[in-house]
Amino acid sequence: MSIPSPIDKNKKNKTHQGKILLVEDDPMVVRMYERKLKMEGFDLQLAFNGELGLEALKKERPDIILCDIMMPKLSGLDMLKIVKGDPQYKDLPMVMLTNLGDRPEDIEKCKGLGAEDYWVKANMQLEEIVEKVKKILSKFYNK
């Protein structure tokens, strides 16, 4: 099955890079990511916990989900299980974000549940996040 490109060819905004759903409960991280990702031409949907992330996903399908692991109400791991268990969204790339560190067992668990990648927020510069998002979108949408 072919997934449509995140880039709307008819859009006048030539800098549009794709739509990201950022699910993160830390306001400081949200502000940093939001500023950088919008500046780079991404459309951004924000959700502050897993429950709100699922609601946002159902309202408007993103091209990629960046999701914190430790959140109130519904954890990122629980959201990952729900998203990957739904035939409508199972092919949607989802990256897990954490500050817990890069323990091999955590990475393996996330990838085993269907995560495209696992990023330790404290170890990554915003430029690196942008480049990794672009690389994943390119892989999934043949850009």
Image: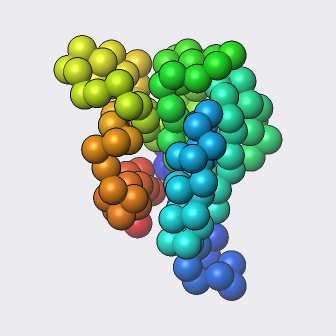
Residue located at (51% from left, 65% from top): 36
Residue located at (38% from left, 41% from top): 121
The scheme the figure's colours follow is rainbow
Quadrant holding the C terminus? bottom left
Residue located at (58% from left, 83% from top): 14
The residue sitting at the left extreme is: 104
Q: In the image, residue 18 lies at what x, y percent?
A: 56, 62
Residue 123 visible in the picture: yes
Q: In the image, residue 46 lies at what x, y percent?
A: 68, 46
The image quarter in which residue 42 lies: bottom right
In the picture, measured across the screen, residue 123 lies left or right of residue 11, that is left
In the picture, measured across the screen, residue 66 lies left or right of residue 116, that is right
Q: In the image, residue 106 lies at what x, y percent?
A: 30, 18
Q: How many marks?
A: 0
The image quarter in which residue 75 lies: top right
Residue located at (55% from left, 72% from top): 39
Figure check: 123 above or below 32: above
Residue 80 visible in the picture: no
Relative to the observer, which residue lies in front, 14 or 22? 22
Q: In the image, residue 11 lies at what x, y percent?
A: 68, 78
